[in-house]
């Protein structure tokens, strides 16, 4: 099975390139037409396309909604139209729940975005599925890993100079290695939208306090007013065999995988 990965040099795509077999890196699609994307797919001879390329910074999308729409809606739609014989997997985001009423956890049908990025990701899901009903949309959480220069939660946790500020917000945190490990099962999913990642009932502030204690660090996070919960109910994916460690255990696993948790229980 040959796998074409967009955003192959990005945080998620690079990890998938390393961990999955028979992968092909897609070139940048930034200025591609629909016909050029169709030619790219045909040339790759891929069986599966994993679309990770995006403008994912919420602030950047707010400042430049036109660029966000191009990257986060228009290009994925071109992929969907061109991928007539390929399985298409698209990464979406928990930001589609940013405007939800209530505390969560949120199910797939509860989406209510309130920022440009979240609105564009939700529109991407709907328009891609209209064209290609067997496509799989993965609403991913805040992901972390160690072998990367990109700032992420784990890197922040390990940086003794980093000031950590978190509130009583419930949000999942997902170990990127576990994302890659679940991919073979993702390929077999029926089309639709899936909440995708680790679950937790703890707040970001509480998780951070416990992890700093686990790391035997003297630091303590600064508590700030709580942000809106981004707590997802991942039952739909779990029923299909898509399993993750809970947020805290995933962090401990990652620390042990990279020998960063020696002499710690």
Image (spheres, rainbow, N blue to C red):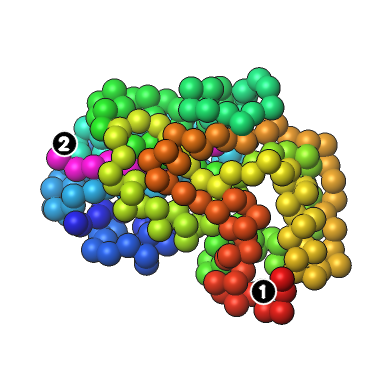
The percent position of residue 154, horizontal first and vertical second, equals 64, 61
Q: Earlier in the sequence, mark 2 or mark 1?
A: 2
Q: Quadrant of residue 13?
A: bottom left
Using the rendered image of the protein, determine whether residue 199 is visible from the camera's viewpoint: yes
Q: Secondary structure at mark 1?
A: loop
Using the rendered image of the protein, determine whether residue 142 is visible from the camera's viewpoint: no
Vertical arrangement, residue 69 with respect to residue 242, above or below: above
Q: Is residue 24 left or right of residue 206?
A: left
Instruction: Please give the residue where the numbered disc 2 appears in the rendered image.
Output: 84
Vertical arrangement, residue 88 with respect to residue 176, above or below: above
**Residue 173 magenta:** no
Residue appearing at x 57%, y 35% in the figure: 232
Residue appearing at x 34%, y 46% in the figure: 186
Q: Quadrant of residue 159?
A: bottom right
Q: Is residue 218 left or right of residue 112?
A: right
Quarter of the C terminus within the rendering: bottom right
The percent position of residue 133, horizontal first and vertical second, equals 26, 28
Vertical arrangement, residue 19 with respect to residue 75, above or below: below
- Of 263 and 11, nearer the camera is 263
How many neighbours does mark 1 have within 10 angstroms: few (below 14), some (14-19), or many (20 or more)? some
Segment tinted magenta in the rendering: 84-94
Magenta stretch secondary structure, dominant: strand
- The Cα–Cα distance between marks 2 and 1, rounded to whole angstroms, is 46 Å
Instruction: Please give the residue where the numbered disc 1 appears in the rendered image.
Output: 261
Quarter of the N terminus within the rendering: bottom left
Q: Is residue 230 left or right of residue 69?
A: right
Q: Secondary structure at mark 2?
A: loop
Q: Is residue 209 left or right of residue 127?
A: right
How many neighbours does mark 2 have within 10 angstroms: few (below 14), some (14-19), or many (20 or more)? few
Disc 2 versus disc 1: nearer the observer: 1
Residue appearing at x 52%, y 28% in the figure: 107
- Of 178 and 65, nearer the camera is 178
């Amino acid at each position: 099975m040959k796998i074409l990965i967009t955003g192959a040099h990005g945080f998620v795509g690079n990890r998938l390139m390393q961990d999955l077999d028979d992968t092909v890196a897609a070139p940048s699609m930034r200025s591609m037409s629909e016909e050029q994307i169709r030619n790219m797919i045909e040339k790759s001879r891929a069986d599966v396309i994993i679309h990770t390329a995006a403008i994912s910074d919420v602030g950047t999308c707010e400042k430049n909604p036109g660029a966000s729409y191009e990257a986060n809606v228009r290009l994925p739609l071109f992929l969907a139209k061109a991928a007539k014989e390929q399985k298409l997997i698209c990464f979406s985001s928990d930001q589609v729940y940013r405007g939800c009423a209530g505390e969560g956890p949120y199910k797939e049908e509860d989406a209510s975005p309130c920022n440009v990025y979240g609105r564009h990701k939700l529109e991407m899901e709907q328009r891609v599925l209209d064209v290609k009903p067997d496509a799989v949309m993965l609403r991913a959480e805040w992901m972390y890993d160690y072998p990367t220069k990109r700032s992420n939660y784990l890197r922040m946790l390990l940086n003794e100079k980093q000031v950590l500020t978190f509130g009583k917000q419930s949000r999942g945190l997902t170990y990127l290695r576990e994302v890659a490990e679940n991919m073979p099962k993702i390929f077999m999913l029926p089309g639709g939208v899936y909440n995708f990642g680790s679950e937790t009932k703890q707040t970001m502030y509480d998780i951070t306090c416990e992890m700093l204690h686990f790391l035997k660090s003297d630091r303590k996070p600064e508590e700030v007013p709580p942000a809106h919960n981004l707590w997802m109910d991942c039952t739909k994916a779990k029923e299909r065999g898509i399993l993750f460690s809970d947020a805290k255990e995933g962090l401990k696993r990652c620390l042990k995988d990279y020998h960063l948790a020696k002499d710690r229980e």
